Image: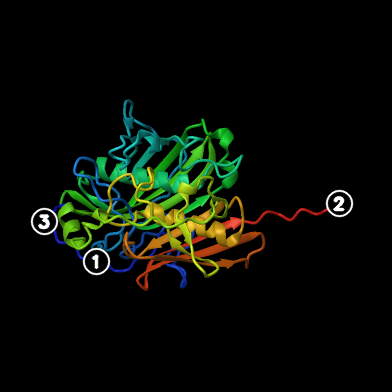
Amino acid sequence: MSPAVVEQPPSPAPTAEEPASPTTTAANPAVSPAVAEEPASPAPTAEEPASPTTAAANPAVSPPVAAEPAPSSPPAPPSSVAEHLAPHSHTPVTKELAHRTRETDVFPARWTRISDTRFRFTAHWPADHSFFGPVDDRHQDPMIVGETLRQASLVLAHAEFGAPADTHFVMWDLTVRVDPSALLLADATEPVEVDVVCSEIRRRGRGLHSMRTTMEFRRAGRFVARGTGSTGCTSSRAYRRLRAAKLDAPDTPVPLLPGIPPRTAGRARPEDVVLAPTEQPGVWHLRVDTGHPVLFQRTNDHVPGMVLFEAARQAATAASGLRPFLPSTMTAGFTRYAELHGPCRIETEVLTEHPGETTVRVAGRQDGESVFTATLTCARPAPVRSLS
């Protein structure tokens, strides 16, 4: 991406799949990339600000530039059938490419190019990760799917599509569909194969302007998940212009609010809770801990998208009362930056209109404006009948 180009805020764009719901920003949870769309709206929550010495950090939500029209021919979905791969074509993933500072937080391990827009990754999902750990004594955390998608997208943006190391990335939307029964702790030693299709690729000069990545995850040949997300790129120079008034935000300490009980949020440790209590049922404040070793690995001038997505999951857990809350579908759409200073309200609505399922709509609002919306759907446990 040429740093000389001034970027303008993009027009609103749907999330990836089927038409967006009138009540949420995130589109229908289905993840088929069959329909190419216009880029998602100015959605801020992607990553952290780029470090000058590493691949662009996750800048979370910089208003993206106006996108060009979507391609007329839709991309084919990721193929789980092995295609002919050239020998010695595997490339290792570094923590810099994945925008992590610790090797233990990098989930994609290596990748190979199949064509100009298709790739295959091998990933590892450790059973004992400090944050993306087990949600109960049987299942791994479904959120690890979205984090792997995010990291793999950044790797490809840099290594395959020419995004410079100081690029800031914007996450516009994210949709993940998971088979929780395939996320078993017993299978954690098995590598995960990830088939990737890149579509809606838009360039500025030799660099990358934006693209969508759609991925299918399998472990030991069994389907685990599908996901899609759209990402925009902002040059370091343009980012400094866009965020000029907020770049010194990290210099002011952020008060750490008391968290809700870990069990209520579906977490095991108090330090991993990202919700603070309010007096209203089903409403919380975002709890920002800039010292968290996974959620805030780098100095940032806003709240990273990973934190907002986790807040949505914890709010869905707390509002539904389901433990564990194992979502089969998670969608999110981001509309603006969540600033470090100033309360961000997390509001929920619980729906039980479909038998056997609970859906929770989550909205994040700051200064009276929408920051993000998310929808998470989880199967309800079947009632157990007494034999007496």
Image-based side of 208 in relation to 371, left or right: left
- Which amino acid lies under the numbered mark 1 shown in the image of this protein? Pro
- Which amino acid lies under the numbered mark 3 shown in the image of this protein? Ala
User: Which residue is the site of mark 2?
Assistant: 387
Task: Say above or below: 333 vs 160.
Answer: below
Q: What residue appears at the point 62 percent right and 66 percent down from the top-left corner?
A: 352
Q: Quadrant of residue 309?
A: bottom left
Q: Earlier in the sequence, mark 3 or mark 2?
A: 3
- Which amino acid lies under the numbered mark 2 shown in the image of this protein? Leu
Q: Find residue 222 and report its horizontal and vertical position in percent.
A: 55, 39
Marks 3/1: CA–CA distance: 16 Å
* Disc 1 residue crowd, few under 14, some 14–19, many 20+, Cα 10 Å: some
User: Which residue is the site of mark 3?
Assistant: 4
Q: Find residue 18 and report its horizontal and vertical position in percent.
A: 45, 63
Q: Secondary structure at mark 2?
A: loop
Q: Secondary structure at mark 1?
A: loop
User: Which residue is the site of mark 1?
Assistant: 9
